[in-house]
Amino acid sequence: MMERMSLLGYAVCGIGLESDALPFDVGGIDRDAMPAGLRRRASEATQLAFSAAARACREAARSPAALPSVFASVGGEMQVTDQLCIELAKPEGLVSPTAFHNSVHNTAAGYWTIVHGCPEPATALAAGHDTFALGLLEAWCQLSCNGGELLVVCYDERWPGYLAPPLGRVAVASAMVLAAGDVPEALAHLGKPCPIGASGNRAEFSNLLETAPAAWALPLLQSAALGEAGPVALSGNGWVGDLLLATSAAA
């Protein structure tokens, strides 16, 4: 039975995300992360997911073509879906086939595997305010059953202001390359995500976490960057992961 998974590389990208207090760089959209032809029709959500995923793979020195992936997002292509709904509400509403094609929840996962010629399986999931925690749990389950390595990406774009406020005020994407068990080159290790019910918020992120569930990666990655071992909140509903430093896990 797998006791922990190893963090090999990570990245965070965002728009409107205050990053001065974070111990790592937060990038914006990386225009080189996807081909120009796709970038012209890709949403903010997909471009951010690609940007974070590409950076995490570079940090881990892993090929995107070789990694299974988990893409987790609360709303997926929310802006595209909203525009489709507006058009359908009109008497003569015309739906763009391209917009419809790009409105599905697994748009980012599908394009990621196509662009990189990746034959490995890709999973897309949503779990409301627990989306980041359940994305990590899915990664844990796949690594525990199959071994090897995996890319997990959690992302959301900015939403129209009339949809579910305060959600969707900040666009953020995080990506991590994880491996089953203990890997010597790991930056840190993470135990199985569990709903123990007493995690609470990190005060410095409280406002951000209420508007962008995908930002729940920040407390975990901050602790990993600062070398703070111990339980880390993965959502506001009690999901927690036990973070271990790479040196202590190997001891």
Image (cartoon, rainbow, N blue to C red):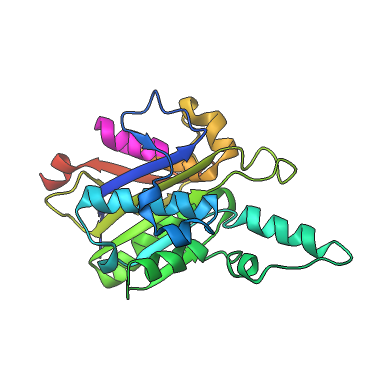
Residue at point 53%, 36% (across, down):
209
Residue at point 56%, 47% (across, down):
157
Q: How many marks?
A: 0
Q: Position of residue 68 (x, y in %)?
A: 33, 67
Q: Position of residue 57 (x, y in %)?
A: 27, 54
Say whether residue 20 is left or right of residue 92.
Answer: left
Residue at point 47%, 61% (across, down):
38
> Which residue is more in the foreground, 58 or 74?
58
**Residue furthest to the bottom:** 119
Tell me which secondary structure the magenta stretch mostly adopts: helix
Q: Position of residue 1 (x, y in %)?
A: 25, 65
Does 121 appear above or below 76? below
Does 146 appear above or below 87? below
Say whether residue 203 is left or right of residue 232.
Answer: right
Q: Magenta span covers which residues?
A: 218-230
- Picture quarter containing residue 208? top right
Q: Position of residue 136 (x, y in %)?
A: 40, 55
Residue at point 64%, 57% (across, down):
80
Q: Is residue 32 visible?
A: yes
> Which residue is more in the foreground, 201 or 128?
128
Does 12 appear above or below 154? above
Residue 151 belongs to the span the image colors magenta:
no
> Which residue is more in the foreground, 208 or 53?
53
Q: Is residue 229 visible?
A: no
- Picture quarter containing residue 104? bottom right
Image quarter in which the C terminus is found: top left
